[in-house]
Amino acid sequence: MSSSHTHNLLFGLAITMLVTGCAATRSIKATNPHDPVRKVDFTKAPEFAELAERARQFGNATYPKVCALLLDESAQPPRQFDLFIAPLKSGNTGETHQEVRRIYLNSDYLTNSPDLNERVEKILVHEMAHMATQFHKRSLLFWKAEPPAIRSWCESIADYAFYKLVGTNGWGCPECNLQFPHYTSGYRCGGAFLLYLESQYGTNLVRELGATLSRQTYSDSFFVNSTGQSLDASWTEFQKTAAFKPEAKRLFELQQALGYVNGRPPRNVEKRFKKYVEQHADPFTKRVLGSAKVDGKHFKDIASLITVYLYFTQPGGTPEHLLADLRDKGELPGFAKGEKGLLTTNLDANAIKPSTFPVTRTLTGSKANDPSIYHYSLVCAAEGAEWKLEKAWRAGPDGKVIEELSLR
């Protein structure tokens, strides 16, 4: 998710959150009529010609492995499909159109990917898993009408497939986090849970789960029959593993307090959240949430508000908290006590939950009638540790440093 949030605080706080002409047809057709990938069409993304060929080769080599991993001998998956690299209106990283045997990769998403090949391979395996299993055979509308539990297990199995065939390191690692806090979220968290269940109860469990989904006979009793204990009991055990991150626990507990059911909020969730914040948040976080804006307008995107709340209430505090506290005490370099201004910070996935430490963040501040930009470099040595201001400097609008600011 990506949006721009502006908060008017002691200094206002601007936050950015965590998503042609006509051309000749460009496509790569199968060299072998029996290849799984019949063609790769990159007409709308001609800059990905090299990637298209790589995707074709990877799809041909990997689709049979996907089928062998997830399906039993009685299954009849599609033998071939077409691959398209193009912008997607939905904004998804990839899509599967099973009724017409097509897989789409979002070229907009791929444009700035630093680990492009790994991402493409994982996205392709995820979509090929959907193509092979055919859990939703008729249409997207039919898929949306499926019960949430069915959809979440389908997405979990698709991510499980790329963990097994591409690997668990790097982008999209198997874990429950702020984005996917519970197995009902599917995707990474559900995939991680399935890896755990497989390690405990054998490699055939996921294949059997897929078969019950295909037959449309799934219920939670499947896990009692397959593992000898309830799904809730297995989930409780899984939460003791390293794949269940502390932030997932915090988010899930907050969702429970707000009345979420299977990852879905109650109708009055905004009212519940407002009450919860009033009872539990510190004054700084209350001001942030109370003045959050997108394009100058207050927003009510509950998922974003919850993410902001969890960020600003994390153990050890945040660099924004530290600068605001220094500002209140009159100890912030470049600002006199009581002087107002605007603080700008970027909140992407790495800022919200860093994967490695120490972490360095740089925030910028500005003041009315002052063209200077004030820069603050802060560091956090370890998870849960307090942030410290390391360096401060004032620069002109052109970015050139005017002076180093002394730390008080």
Image: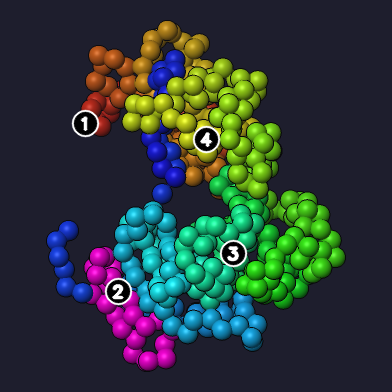
Tell which circle, 1 or 4, labels the residue nearer the N-terminal end. 4
Residue 178, quarter of picture: top right
Q: Amino acid at mark 1?
A: Asp
On screen, residue 286 above or below 154: above
Whole-percent x, y for residue 222 in the image: 76, 66
Tell which circle, 4 or 2, labels the residue nearer the N-terminal end. 2
Q: Which mark is residue 398?
A: 1
Query: SS for tag 1?
Result: loop
Q: Residue at x 39, y 53 (%)?
A: 91
Q: Quick one: quadrant of the N terminus? A: top left
Residue tagged by mark 2?
A: 41
Q: CA distance from mark 3 to mark 2?
A: 27 Å
Which residues are the magenta region? 26-50
Q: Amino acid at mark 4?
A: Ile
Residue tagged by mark 4?
A: 302
Residue extending furthest toward the top:
338
Query: SS for tag 2?
Result: strand
Query: SS for tag 4?
Result: helix
Q: Residue at x 44, y 73 (%)?
A: 99
Tell which circle, 3 or 1, labels the residue nearer the N-terminal end. 3
Q: Alpha-carbon neighbours of circle 3 within 10 Å: few (<14), some, or many (≥20)?
A: many
Q: Alpha-carbon neighbours of circle 4 within 10 Å: few (<14), some, or many (≥20)?
A: few
Q: CA distance from mark 4 to mark 3?
A: 25 Å
Judged by depth in the image, the label closer to the viewer, 3 or 2, is: 3
On screen, residue 400 above or below 109: above
Q: Residue at x 38, y 35 (%)?
A: 4
330 or 207: nearer the eye? 207
On screen, residue 134 above or below 188: below
Q: Alpha-carbon neighbours of circle 1 within 10 Å: few (<14), some, or many (≥20)?
A: few
| Residues at discs 3 and 1 in contact (Cβ within 8 Å) | no
Q: Residue at x 65, y 20 (%)?
A: 279
